Image: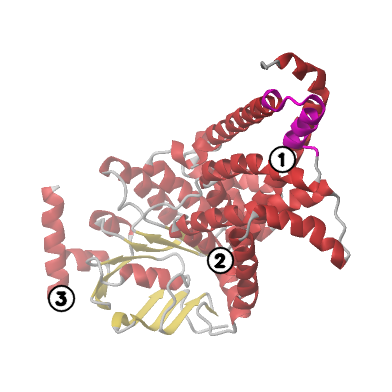
């Protein structure tokens, strides 16, 4: 059918005016693989992640998901329809959760399935319960987001994304905004997803977590992938001097915390 | 000559009918101004220029001219082009559109103030632009704007007295009718004022209730 990998990024580049934030990035992710993207702030890792579902479209290059090009050049109306379609296959979890505050947990989860998959209220409800059970928050189904802790909010956000049955999940620093004691509950949910072989691309500052769940790690700096490899190599024995410097600095700041 | 409030109860039926009309006009115009205000806000923010520009002119007409003139125009002026509206309907439309323009300004600001992350989250799930507005952005914007809109509705109540000039027997005109027959302006104007104040208090209570109910969902 196609010669592209499950998720494939080819020659990705992006600039804001004269500032080039991504340069010639290539990435292949196979089905069920988990890839972590690490790097200092401003390295372009979040921009790359947001390019995958067209939140921040690339200036040039291609993004493919299961043989479908996501960033197709199309006339405006067709492009909108295409993007709305492909985004249903790409779950995204944000640093600041972005739950809908005017809706209950149940409504947060069922909104998109009802609108986009034509699910009845009953079907959508069953789905919401199933997803919430998975993230361990069944008892919060009728709560509003303002009644949840940060960790609970993020677990609901994950359940909301999973309810669309995405082919790939993108995590944009999902635990960076959480108090340290709430990080673990979110990490556990992500680990569980890993065990179910969900394809995931994770932008993170949690080196320990990345090392324990990921198949591959990309180190980005200055808009390019500086080094890429299995976690045991990147974290234990990186080749590149910039990777080493970054990890050393990161280790220090974490010890000082 | 002394004040004598004992004449008031004899005209209570006239006054209460006036109260009823005032409430109907205020309610009708409030509901109209609320929904049309949302519609105007979306036009002002998202419509293409060839819709937006004529709309701006229309908006200017309603913000830049006296409400009284607008009521005359809708009630007397439109007859000439074949639109003969009953006075009550003309009053509700005039007040409703006038306040819709003011509500629209509030709602526009509120829409723009909804966190970008909300739109991103909705679009990421696959919602279209329109669905995102309809289900995520506008409901939040409207919730945030309920206190200032409530203030507009109280101003609308007071402006509903202007509808008396096109012949709707609302509270102010009813008071005048009673005065015409008794020559007791002080008593009846004070009575009318008391009723306006009472309606005002009820509106504030309703507004507080709504605000309490939505407090959780912000």
| Residue at the spot of label 2 | B45
Question: Residue at image x 76%, y 38%?
Answer: B24
Separation of residues labelled 1 and 2 (CA atoms)? 27 Å
Q: Are marks 1 and 2 on the same chain?
A: yes
Mark 3 residue crowding within 10 angstroms, few (<14) / some (14–19) / many (20+): few
- Please, what secondary structure does the residue beneath circle 2 have? helix
Question: Residue at image x 75%, y 31%?
Answer: B175
- Please state the horizontal and vertical placement of residue A217, each as a whole percent of the image: 29, 68
Question: Residue A77 magenta-drawn?
Answer: no
Separation of residues labelled 3 and 2 (CA atoms)? 50 Å
Q: Which mark is residue B27?
A: 1
Position above or below: A138 against A121: above
Magenta residues span B169-187
- Please state the horizontal and vertical placement of residue A137, each as a whole percent of the image: 48, 38
B132 on left or right of A49? right
Say whether residue A114 is visible. no
The chain identifier of the residue carrying mark 2 reads B
Number of labels in the image equals: 3
The chain identifier of the residue carrying mark 3 reads A
| Residue at the spot of label 3 | A240
Separation of residues labelled 1 and 3 (CA atoms)? 71 Å
- Of the two numbered discs 1 and 2 on the same chain, state the one appearing first in sequence: 1
- Please state the horizontal and vertical placement of residue B27, each as a whole percent of the image: 71, 40
């Amino acid at each position: 059918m196609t010669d592209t990998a499950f998720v494939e990024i080819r020659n990705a580049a992006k600039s804001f005016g004269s500032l080039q934030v991504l340069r010639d990035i290539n990435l292949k992710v196979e089905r069920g693989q988990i890839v972590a993207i690490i790097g200092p702030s401003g390295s372009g890792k979040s921009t790359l992640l947001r390019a995958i579902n067209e939140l921040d479209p690339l200036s040039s290059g291609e993004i493919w998901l299961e043989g479908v090009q996501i960033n197709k050049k199309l006339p405006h109306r067709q492009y909108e329809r295409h993007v709305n379609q492909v985004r249903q296959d790409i779950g995204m979890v944000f640093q600041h959760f972005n739950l809908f505050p005017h809706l209950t947990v149940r409504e947060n989860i069922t909104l998109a399935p009802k609108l986009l998959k034509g699910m009845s209220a009953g079907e959508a409800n069953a789905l919401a319960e199933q997803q919430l059970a998975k993230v361990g928050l069944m008892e919060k189904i009728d709560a509003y987001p303002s009644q949840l802790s940060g960790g609970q909010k993020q677990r609901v956000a994950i359940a909301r994304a999973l309810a669309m049955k995405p082919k790939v999940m993108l995590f944009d620093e999902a635990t960076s905004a959480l108090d340290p004691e709430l990080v673990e509950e979110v990490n556990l949910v992500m680990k569980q997803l890993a065990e179910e072989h969900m394809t995931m691309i994770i932008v993170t500052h949690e080196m320990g977590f990345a090392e324990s769940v990921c198949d591959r790690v990309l180190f980005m700096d200055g808009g390019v992938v500086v080094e890429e490899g299995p976690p045991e190599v990147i974290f234990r024995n990186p080749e590149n001097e910039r990777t080493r410097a970054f990890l050393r600095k990161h280790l220090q700041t974490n010890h000082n915390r | 000559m002394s004040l004598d409030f004992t004449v008031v109860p004899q005209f209570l039926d006239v006054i209460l009918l006036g109260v009823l009309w005032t409430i109907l006009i205020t309610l009708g115009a409030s509901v109209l101004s609320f929904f049309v205000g949302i519609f105007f806000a979306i036009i002002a923010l998202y419509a293409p220029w060839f819709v937006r520009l004529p709309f701006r002119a229309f908006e200017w007409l309603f913000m830049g001219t006296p409400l009284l003139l607008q009521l005359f125009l809708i009630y007397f002026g439109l007859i000439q082009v074949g639109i003969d509206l009953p006075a009550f309907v003309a009053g509700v439309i005039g007040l409703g559109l006038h306040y819709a323009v003011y509500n629209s300004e509030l709602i526009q600001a509120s829409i723009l103030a909804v966190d970008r992350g909300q739109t991103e989250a909705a679009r990421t799930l696959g919602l279209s632009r329109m669905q995102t507005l309809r289900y995520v952005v506008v409901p939040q914007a409207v919730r945030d704007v309920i206190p200032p809109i409530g203030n507009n509705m109280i101003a609308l109540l007071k402006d509903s007295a202007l509808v008396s000039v096109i012949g709707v027997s609302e509270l102010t005109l009813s008071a005048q009718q009673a005065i015409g027959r008794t020559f007791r302006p002080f008593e009846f104007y004070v009575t009318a004022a008391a009723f306006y104040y009472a309606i005002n208090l009820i509106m504030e209570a309703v507004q507080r209730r709504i605000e309490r109910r939505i407090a959780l969902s912000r």
